[in-house]
Each structure stands twice: as structure tokens, then as C-alpha cells.
Amino acid sequence: MISAKVRGALLCTVLLLVSACGAGAQPASETSAPTAGPQETSPSPSTPAAIPSGEVMTSDNVRLVANMPKVAPLDKEGDFNTDLAFQGDYAYVGNFGGFAIYDISEPTKPELVSQVSCPAQQNDVTIYDDLLILSIDQPSGGEECDSDPDGRAWEGLRLFDVSDKKSPKYVGAVATDCGSHTHTMVPDGDRLYVYVSSPGPEPGSETCPPPHELIQIVEVPLKSPESAKIVAKPDIFPERQSSDFASGCHDITAYPEKKLAAAACFGDGVLLDISDPVAPKVLQQITDKENFQIWHSATFNNDATKVVFGDELGGGGQPTCDHNTPVTKGANAVYDLVNNRLERRSYFKIPREQQPNENCVAHNGSLLPVPGKDIMVQAWYQGGVSIWDFTDSASPKEIGYFERGPFPGGGGIAGAWSAYYYNGYIYSSDIQEGLDVIEINDPLTDPAKQVKMDDFNVQTQKSY
């Protein structure tokens, strides 16, 4: 059984262990690391009129333009939609049951092209040329999709050739210590380096032995991806990690053009120099024990002068967007990057209080490509999708939102897992409701519609 302390503490590792997610959910009452600048917070949440189950509420500048419900074989109980990636006219959607490919050439009328049954947690997905990569954070009997699900001998990365979108082909796999919770691509000529993030250790496990204060770097030769292998296991922590939940990292966002990466590593944020992608160097390790519990994700602004870190308080299985939870917890922290040093300026949390049966906390998001502005769209599970402006680092504010009422049936695990902006629209991967396509029309965000991307993997940032 997976350790409740190590992996059950994280919703997006074992979503069914909600009771374990709740254990020890309150952050330790310790003083945060010294920071520069004011520590302003977003306003206290206001209680909205309750939204009936399944109904949609939006700000005036946001509208839902399409929804693609999950369909067989990726619609069984526990087949939760997870992360997203984009390339050309296609969106790739991870799912605990496998992955799906959608034609989004007409964003208001997306079409399902194909689905691959490949059960695993959490099947986070990236795309590069014709290569699709899945993160597998669940031991199984072997590397292929039809391996014994009750086995305990393998977890890591699975690789697929998607040159034929209607018929993806499995091409190989790489076993990694403690699996792969998420992964980050760093292209380098005819090779692709993949940074593997995973929680651990799990004493007694075949796949996740102690110790585990590290990340793993996989080299994928693009002409022969089946020969991919681990080439480095750097320990990126000059000091011991601060998390009581797990060692290792949850998410790493690379910005190859700037030769930087920001790692969210459960109890710590780590700023990295990736000039040599196989040997990242630590520039700074920070923590915030007073306000952050699980350092979940990181996003640079376009100029790489700021980093937004998100806190997944309670692992995502709790209603932390309520009046009982301070606005600095389960939120985002905005840091300015000054002379390669992170300085905290503020926190941001959605200003709408959620109902007691709605799990809600900061989760996956991305920048809107608005020149001269720092604007982000972000998923908050049942808190929905929020568009917020952090151009003024000390005073971030929400400028638009989309959310549904509580998932029918009295709560449970539901809501937006990832929400990303791609070529004029916001795409949201909803755990239960499928793929949402959302449009925002606002003077602040309209310039983003002029920016066209050829592809988009949120953890590999590119300038615009």
C-alpha cells in the first residue's frame, strides 16, 4: 500500500484517499524565511449565492463556449481528467484511464480524434514533435499499458508516437525512482531532456526506496525515443527539505531561453540555473512554513523577472477557499526575481468563498501572452477557473472567472485540474466534466489573441 504520509497526502497522487489528504492539513506555525517587500494579501473571500449543482457562473467578461464530456473508455469511476498539452490544432488531455486527442481547429466545436486506454496515476502529458510522454506515479506489473495493474515492480515514463493522431503507438518507457508525478521537457537539439518530479520515499517499496531528495533527468534521443534512459539524478537541495510529507519535487517549470528553472518541491521553492540541462545549479532555496504546506507549482512571467508559486494545501481534497482558511494559505505567492534572488511581494487567492462540499485550492495554470502585462489563468478545482493580474506584484487582483456549482451527489473530488490559455481560448481539463473551452473578452487580455503558438507545454516556458 502506498504510504499515506508520502503519497496519500497529495490529491493528484492518490485522489481517492481524501481522508488521508485531510490528515495534518494545517501548516506548521513557524516563521517564514526572511523576505523583502510588503506582504499584502488578496481581499477576504466573499460568500456568493450558492450555485446549484452543475450550473455555471461566470464574470461578465467570460463565457463557456464548448464542453466535451468524457466518453468510454475514459469515463469509468476514477477516470479523472488531468493535465493538458497543445500542438497545432490539437489538444492532448491526460486521464487516469489513459489520454485523449482533440481536434481544436474550431475551438468552439472541438472534436474527439482518438483515445488510448492506459490506466495509471496521473498520466500528466506533454507533446514534442511526434512524441507524447506520460507521467506514471503508480506502481504496476510492467512498463506497457496492459501490464498487471496489481503488480508493484514498475513506474516512470511512457512514450508514444502520435504522428498518426487517430492511432497513437506505444514506443517505450523509462523506469524512475518513485515513478513520475509530473515531468518537464528541456529541448536540446536532437535530444530531449526530461526532468522527472516524484514524491518519496516509500520504505519497503520496490520502486521508491529511500533516500529520495532528488530529481531525475531522462535523455530522449528524438530519432530513437525507445532508447531513452536516465542520465542524471541531481540533489538540488543545499539544505534539507522542509516538507513533512515527502522528499523530491512536485513540479518543475523550465524556461530554457532564460536558462532558468523554478522547482516546487513540497516544502521548498528552488531556483535553478539550467545552462547545463544535465547539471542544474541551485541559485536559491526558499521556504514559507507559516503559509505554504505543499509547494505545488511554479510559473515565470514572460520576462523571467517574477515567479508565482502555488500552495496545494491539504493535497487538494479540502474546501480551503472558505472563511476558515486565511487568504495566504492554499494560495499563490508572487515573488520578484532580483539579481537572481527571489523576494516575496504578495499572496493571491480567489475572492469567492466556496461551499463546504467543494474541494478548492490553487492548482495548475499558465500565463496569458499579453505584452507588458503579467496575467495568468489558473484552475482551482471546484473553485473553477480564475483569470488574475499580477502586473503589480504587491497587489494582484482577479479580472475574470468561471465556475460550476458543487459536483452533483454531495461533493466529492471534482473541478478544474488544469486551465491554460492557447491561441485565443482557455482550455480547462475538468476532473469530472471533461474538456471545457472558455473565452475571455476583456481590454486587458484582448492583446493575447494576436499571439499564435505552434505548441504549448506549460512546464516548458517560451517567450512571446
Image (cartoon, rainbow, N blue to C red):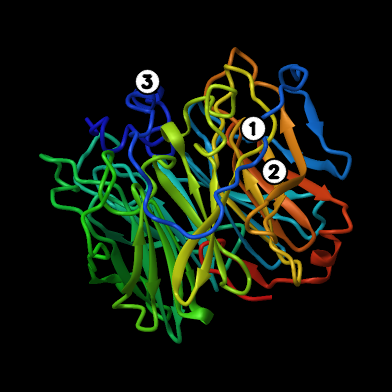
Please state, as top left, top right, bottom left or bottom right, where the C terminus lies in the image: bottom right
Mark 3 crowd level (few <14, some 14–19, many ≥20, 10 Å Cα): few
Tell me where residue 222 appears, x and y as whole percent: 43, 78
Which circle's residue, 3 or 2, is located before the other in the chain?
3
- Tell me the amino acid under the disc marked 3: Ser
Q: Name the foreground residue: 160 vs 399.
A: 399
Tag 3 residue:
19
Is the residue 303 above or below the residue 308 in the image?
Answer: below
The residue depicted at 50 percent of the width and 37 percent of the height is 329
In front of the other: 162 or 250: 250
Q: Are marks 1 and 2 in contact (CB under 8 Å)?
A: yes
Q: Residue at x 56, y 72 (%)?
A: 304
| Residue toward you, 446 or 104 | 446
Q: CA distance from mark 3 to mark 1?
A: 20 Å
Which residue type carries mark 1?
Gly
Q: Badge 2 is on which residue?
A: 386
Measure the alpha-carbon separation of dots 1 and 2: 8 Å
First in residue order: circle 3 vs circle 1: 3
Question: Which residue position holds label 1?
Answer: 383
Kind of element beneath mark 2: strand
User: Judging from the image, what secondary structure is the residue with disc 3 in?
Assistant: helix
Residue 409: x and y in percent read 61, 13
